[in-house]
Image (cartoon, rainbow, N blue to C red):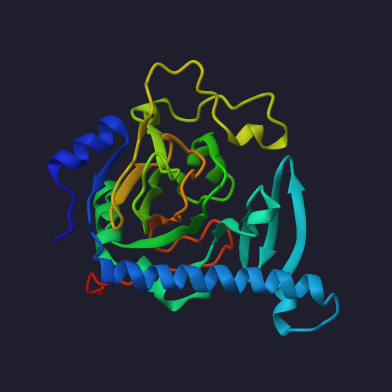
Amino acid sequence: MHAVTPEERDQFEKLGFFTRLNLFSETELQAIRVAAENVHQRVVDAADRKSDEPGPGNPENASVGPVDQVDNQKYQEILGSTIKWEWDDDLRAVRSMEPVFQLDDHLAAVIDDPRLWKPCSDIIGCPTLSLFSDKLNVKRPGGAPFPWHQEGPYWAYGAEDLERVITLILYLDDASVENGCLWIIPGTHKYGPLESLKDRGTLGRLYTDVEQLEEKPIPMDLPAGSVGFFHRDIVHGSQTNRTEENRRAYLLAYQPAGLHQWRNGEQRDIKTNGSGQA
């Protein structure tokens, strides 16, 4: 059950991805959305309290770091998570937070769902896994794009077994071209790490120069509850959310059991006795 089919494995090897539609029911998704919104609000509240109360104030203030600006992007460490704020200050919204499962038990339970980890286990050929990274993307209306990039070069600094890291995206909302769904360039995983941009400031080294690629991008416009499984080196990115609705997603990356998480160096093995329900 949940095992990768021969067709999925073949597509993963040739194109660097495969998808499964409607893995999660609307009832399950609603519970995950509530968890995502609770975490988002907790982070925003903690940041606001820190700004209003520069002294000791609330105990959570100690878990809120200063805002760091790199090129046009703003980062902040809050409650054990690296927060990337939206470019537009008027949105007062998080673009992404990583890691995040430690802030909500429901999100932590999603990590152990065999509908997510079992296909990854099959692909990397390891029966037991641990968490490499988890990230919540909260793309509000007007949310900014994310340039073309690969995860491999980004993760190389800190991964203990990069060759056996696999990533996935669980859409919490219907994803469309209009609301900034993920785009991928199939087959680009075969090239390994590609050249980065040379003229994009400090962060340019994390963005992929796609001008020389012959492959064409395709949108991952999938219904809520669907999951895309990806090779770490497939080139991907997203565009602006041009709608009035949210486009939220939960991204997970798995690795063999016993290894440490990328961001915090802690170990979090997957519980394999999950029921398949989030």
Q: From the top left corner, tell me how far across and down residue 119 is, in percent.
A: 25, 53
Which residue reaches farthest right? 55
Question: Which quarter of the figure has residue 97?
Answer: bottom right
Residue at 20% from the left image edge and 35% from the top image edge: 10
Q: Quadrant of the N terminus?
A: bottom left
Depth order, front residue of 91/135? 91
Question: Which quarter of the figure has residue 264?
Answer: bottom right
Depth order, front residue of 18/123? 18
Residue at 49% from the left image edge and 37% from the top image edge: 150
Q: From the top left corner, tell me how far across and down residue 229 is, in percent.
A: 32, 47
Determine whether, in the image, residue 129 is placed left or right of residue 206: left
Q: From the top left corner, tell me how far across and down residue 185 is, in percent.
A: 39, 29
Picture layout, residue 237 above or below residue 22: above
Viewer can see residue 15: yes
Residue at 34% from the left image edge and 40% from the top image edge: 220
Residue at 54% from the left image edge and 56% from the top image edge: 262
Question: Which quarter of the figure has residue 31?
Answer: bottom left
Q: From the top left corner, tell me how far across and down residue 86 is, in percent.
A: 63, 51
Determine whether, in the image, residue 136 is placed left or right of residue 226: right
Q: Quadrant of the C terminus?
A: bottom left
Viewer can see residue 270: no
Q: Tell me how many marks there are.
A: 0
Determine whether, in the image, residue 212 is placed left or right of residue 117: right
Picture layout, residue 113 above or below residue 226: below
Determine whether, in the image, residue 158 is placed left or right of residue 114: right
Depth order, front residue of 86/136? 86
